Amino acid sequence: MTTEQWGELKKQLLETVGESNYRNWIEPLQFVDSTGGVARIAAPTNFAGTYVSRNYGDLILHRISSFDSGVRRIEFSTAPANTQAIPAARRTEAAAAAGAAAAPAPAAAPARRPVSARESMLPPAPLDSRFTFDTFVVGKPNELAHAAARRVAEGGPVTFNPLFLYGGVGLGKTHLMHAIAWELKTSHPELNVVYLSAEQFMYRFVQALRDKKIMDFKSLFRSVDVLMVDDVQFIAGKDSTQEEFFHTFNALIDQNRQIIISGDCPPGEMKDMEERIKSRLQCGLVVDLHPTDYELRLGILQSKTDSFRAQQPDLVIKDGVLEFLAHRISTNVRVLEGALTRLFAFASLVGREITLELAQDCLSDILRASERKITVEEIQRRVSDHYNIRLSDMLGPKRVRSFARPRQVAMYLAKQMTSRSLPEIGRRFGGRDHTTVLHGVKRIEELRQQDGQIAEDLEMLRRALEA
């Protein structure tokens, strides 16, 4: 495979993986050689090589084999400090580039920020260019989380640390995390902002242990200005990773560096997470992204429709379609957006208007799967609103009747209207034992037969949840 073919291959990958992923992972790769059916590619770090191998290896192998059918597998290595691993033709190319760099650059050529040594050792996780504050639709269920994220993204003095965002799947946690990172990188390029998932944190920690570079790992992570860790529940039960995360957390807090973390549940409800970590996570601002309501879902659909129309102005969507989707697909924003994408793609391909009938036919499987997908969290919020108590009181340890009865009602509805087991329901009610849930369910079942008010409340709540 020639240098020119490798350049052509990278252009193809740019179109496939997108600009952000290409810039972070593909562009730094160097083609070394291909012998014996093996294509050798140099990456800037061991982690980068492993990440590319796992996420893009099959794609790269497929593209290489289109140029050289004899290549059957790929090997990634770390590019050495010298140039011995780079073929002579590429060394000549590099020398020419160095000579060109010494000459005055054309006025129209934008200056490119050099990659620092820190970035080469600690490559950031790729950010999705779609996930910005401009594309985040704000509604009552997420307005506090959005406001907190905006405040942190201003990059001023640290007012609450850490910021902990939690909520179910598809409610916007990752979107807000990416939006914060984009905003900080744009308005404060001097800050060292590191965004990664908890899984990536664990992998880099294990990699550092294996390569005997744990001190480099500690130094790098404890010298960032803003650390963002997504889906922190992933490290629960992983003792060594939790230990290192704990010490990294403390070191950054002591230096007044901003930490932003997301999870799928409140810190206190994370199973197999060390108590000291739970305590640290709760010492800042903990914000819940509630399940979306009808108005927010409709706003998301309208925003996405506007972006589709900008690309395909000829598409026609009839009145009532968006309202129908916002009503029927209520559990997950990703599913909701995916349904609309499928609908627009189908209408575009067959050249038809988007009507209610077309939506029902095209999305029949999604609509079936979305029926009665009521969450425990939605039930808890609805019940607490109905009885005019705070959600934290219903989930908390207090046993006074004004909190205990609504708690039992919510447990009863969770058992009747979701597929969650008693232990799972108990965990969502402040880590209570399944026997407590069973007692609450039985008690409400008895009261439903004896107390007309309880029976009326249950029916009203059921209708509201199913609406």
Image (cartoon, grey):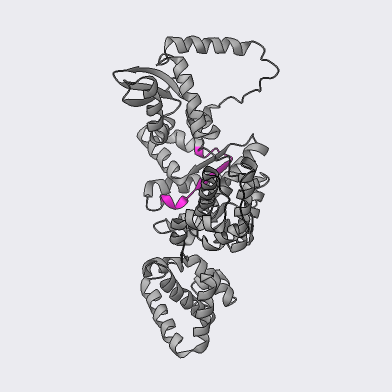
Identify the residue at horizontal 48%, vertical 74% (top origin).
410
Q: Is residue 446 above or below residue 368?
A: below
Pick the quarter of the image with the N terminus.
Answer: top left
Q: Residue furthest bottom?
A: 450
In the rendering, at what x and y percent does residue 10 appear? 48, 24
In the rendering, at what x and y percent does residue 293 appear? 58, 63
Identify the residue at horizontal 59%, vertical 51% (top origin).
161
Q: Is residue 265 above or below residue 177?
A: below
In the rendering, at what x and y percent does residue 423 appear? 37, 68
Q: Is residue 69 above or below residue 374?
A: above
Residue 400 visible in the snapshot: no
**Quarter assignment of residue 63:** top left
Q: Is residue 358 highlighted in magenta?
A: no
Identify the residue at horizontal 41%, vertical 23% (top origin).
42
Instruction: Specify the segment rendered in magenta.
Output: 221-235
- Number of numbered markers: 0
Residue 464 visible in the snapshot: yes
Q: Residue furthest right?
A: 107
Identify the residue at horizontal 54%, vertical 78% (top origin).
460
Pick the quarter of the image with the C terminus.
Answer: bottom right
Between 219 and 43, the one lying in front of the other is 43
In the rendering, at what x and y percent does residue 449 appear? 43, 88
